[in-house]
Amino acid sequence: MNPEILKMVPLFSSLSSEQLRLLQPCLQQRIYPRSSFIVRAGEETDALYIILSGHAKVLIPDEQGREVILAFLGPHDFFGEMGLFDEQRRSASVETTEQCTVLRFSKTGFLSCISENFDLALVVIRNLVKRLRAADRKIESLALLDVYGRVARLLLEHAQEIDGMLIVKSAPPKQEMARMIGASREMVSRVIKDLQDRGYIRTEKRKVYLLDKFSMLSRTPTKRPAVVPPPARKGAA
């Protein structure tokens, strides 16, 4: 592998050519086909992984075989660093959603490199903070928002501004959206249809155009009318 290729990866962009050359023996390039696991929850943490091309999802399986999707990863994203710091086994699995080319950064090489390069350590720390903030938002959504609010927030988080419009270029399938927000596929489909009927979004295959984000965020679930008990009859105990 040409060490200069690593310059295109943000994690390594601060390293000199000589540092990259010395780092090369610690890196292995691997290719994973679609729907294969790069790592599994419970495995020993022995490396950090950087995605060069392709996409993958981070998930946690439960005892019933269901999955909760924590995040989607794409080119230049990395994962596996937490276990390298705390010596714990992997807390989640990472499965490819398409063929991925991945760099495996050995634990020994990673810890040695990070101890000698502050900029690299700072990138990793910022990535950990970013994931903590994302976890906070997910906990908040599960605790405070109904399914409608969770779907709306998910779409907004995946949207990009293109020519003045907010667009989700490739929305996750409804089943995966359901796994991401802790709801059923049927409920997600119902909410998407309601958002379309109200004119808040427009869908074209996998693309979703967010036409009125303020209404999406301000909508509150319809409350059930309070049940007023009938007046007590005279003489009742």
Image: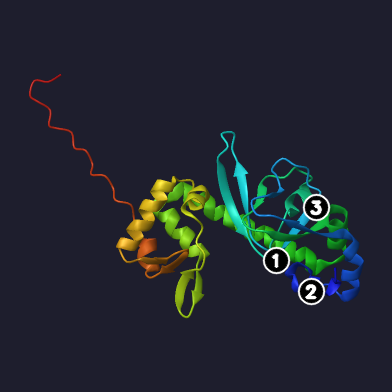
Q: CA distance from mark 1 to mark 3?
A: 16 Å
Q: Position of residue 96 (x, y in %)?
A: 65, 54
State yes or no: discs 1 and 3 in contact (Cβ < 8 Å): no
Question: What amino acid is labelled 1 in the image?
Answer: His
**Crowding at mark 1 (Cα within 10 Å: few <14, some 14-19, many 20+):** some
Q: Earlier in the sequence, mark 1 or mark 3?
A: 3
Residue furthest toward the bottom?
Answer: 163
Numbered label tally: 3
Q: Is residue 214 visible?
A: yes
Lower position in the chain sequence, tag 2 or tag 3:
2
Residue 234 appears at what percent x and percent y?
7, 24
Image quadrant where one finds the C terminus: top left
Q: CA distance from mark 2 to mark 3?
A: 20 Å
Going from the N terminus, do you reach mark 1 or mark 2 first?
A: 2
Which residue position is annotated with label 3? 47
Q: Residue at the spot x=72%, y=48% of the render?
A: 39
Question: Which residue carries the number 2 mark?
Answer: 7
- Identify residue type, mark 3: Ala
| SS at circle 1 | loop
Q: Is residue 159 above or below residue 38?
A: below
Q: Amino acid at mark 2?
A: Lys
What residue would you read off at disc 1? 76
Q: In this image, 10 relative to 26: left or right?
A: left
Q: CA distance from mark 1 to mark 2?
A: 11 Å
Under tag 3, what secondary structure?
A: strand
Q: Is residue 89 left or right of residue 68?
A: right
Image quadrant containing the N terminus: bottom right
- Of residue 138 and residue 165, the one placed in the foreground of this image is 165
Are there few (<14), some (14-19), or many (20+) residues within 10 Å of tag 3?
A: many
* 109 lies left or right of 58: right
